[in-house]
Amino acid sequence: MERPVSAFSLFLLAFLAPGILAGGCNMTGFWRNDLGSVFYLSEAQNFRLNGQYLTAVEAAREEAGPEKQAQVIGIRSNGKEPTFSMSTAWAGGSITSWVGQCLILEGGQQVLKTTWLLRSPATSLQEDWKATRIGQDTFHQTNEATLKVNHH
């Protein structure tokens, strides 16, 4: 016997998974930029993002740690093409934060268009001028599971 879907069930699904019903961006999965850096992201309740980031570049040797990988936490907005913010702390004391938007291209391909800030520890107020870098990246979805994902 089929059970009817209740209005409450539909409301709950719409609240917890807005992208699914709207056919919107799904940020869960692997994302790679042109330099070879990779995000593994997973969407959680209340629009939270969790995951790992594997960097392909470092400003200084071992700044990102021996595995060049760190945990990422963030939050995304509601909507078909949500905006988001994510951050990670590196072994060498630097912090990287990304803000951006998940966009759906023609043909259904999804990309993460980001602007990032990298803040490295300054050794003095006089050296502060060179402690912050800014840039932009576009991450494309990939099926390639290149990270050793650590679930904390």
Image (tube, rainbow, N blue to C red):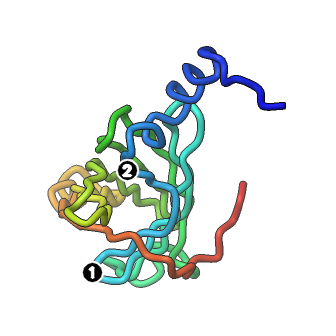
- Residue at screen point 44% across, 52% down: 26
Q: Amino acid at mark 2?
A: Cys
1 and 64: which is toward the camera:
1
Residue under pointer 1:
34
Say which quadrant the C terminus sits in.
bottom right
Q: Which mark is residue 23?
A: none
Nearest to viewer (mark 1 / mark 2): 2
Q: Secondary structure at mark 2?
A: loop
Residue at the location (57% across, 24% down)? 10
Q: Tags 1 and 2 in contact by the CB under 8 Å rule?
A: no
Query: Residue 68's spot in the image, x, y percent?
Result: 51, 77
Q: Is residue 145 left or right of residue 92?
A: right
Q: Secondary structure at mark 1?
A: loop
- Give percent across and percent down for residue 95: 40, 55
Q: Residues within 10 Å of mark 2 (few under 14, many from 20)?
A: many
Q: Earlier in the sequence, mark 1 or mark 2?
A: 2
Residue at the farthest front position: 1
For the N terminus, give its image quadrant. top right
Q: Say which residue appears at 33% left-offset and 60% top-offset.
A: 120
Q: CA distance from mark 1 to mark 2?
A: 20 Å
Q: Tag on residue 25?
A: 2
Q: Identify whether 151 is placed above or below 22.
A: below
